[in-house]
């Protein structure tokens, strides 16, 4: 099964979406990730389940996490 960028998060059934424990459960302000059967990773905004999900390779997600851990995105912090 193959998924393309822009597929709605709600249309991908049977996935276990994972949210950060720092998410706001009342407002649902969070990014959520799910591993796809292909091994790729889908990312979506939980406030908009009918909105698009982006699909990334595992190496793309790994590169993002390395950058986050190194503080490369700290200038974007609120």
Image (cartoon, rainbow, N blue to C red):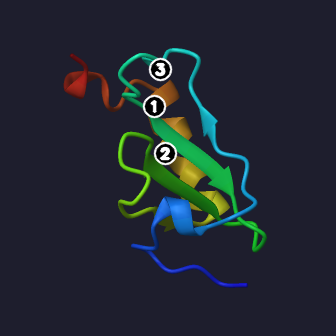
Q: Residues within 10 Å of mark 2 (few under 14, many from 20)?
A: some
Q: Residue 21 carries which label?
A: none
Q: Do the residues bearing badges 2 and 1 touch, measured as CB atoms within 8 Å?
A: yes
- Residue depicted at 42% across the width and 17% down the height: 24
Q: Do the residues bearing badges 2 and 3 touch, measured as CB atoms within 8 Å?
A: no
- Residue depicted at 75% across the width and 60% down the height: 14
Q: Is residue 15 above or below residue 47?
A: below
Q: Evaluate whether residue 27 shows in this view.
A: yes
Residue denoted by label 2: 64
Q: How crowded is mark 3: few (under 14 residues within 10 Å), some or many (20 or more)?
A: few
Q: In this view, does 14 lie above or below 78?
A: below
Residue denoted by label 1: 68
Q: In which quarter of the image is the C terminus?
A: top left
- Residue depicted at 35% across the width and 22% down the height: 27
The answer for how far apart the CA atoms under marks 2 and 3 are is 19 Å
Tell which circle, 2 or 3, labels the residue nearer the N-terminal end: 3
Question: x, y (%) of residue 4?
Answer: 50, 80
The answer for how far apart the CA atoms under marks 2 and 1 are is 6 Å
Q: In this view, does 51 lie to the left or right of 70?
A: left
Residue denoted by label 3: 23
Q: Nearer the viewer, residue 51 or 56?
A: 51
Question: x, y (%) of residue 71?
Answer: 39, 24
């Amino acid at each position: 099964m193959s998924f393309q960028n822009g597929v709605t998060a709600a249309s991908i059934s049977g996935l276990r979406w994972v949210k950060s424990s720092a998410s706001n459960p009342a407002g649902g302000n969070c990014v959520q990730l799910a591993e796809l059967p292909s091994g790729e990773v889908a990312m979506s905004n939980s406030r908009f389940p009918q909105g698009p999900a982006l699909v990334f390779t595992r190496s793309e997600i790994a590169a993002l996490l390395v950058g986050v851990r190194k503080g490369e995105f700290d200038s974007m912090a609120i």
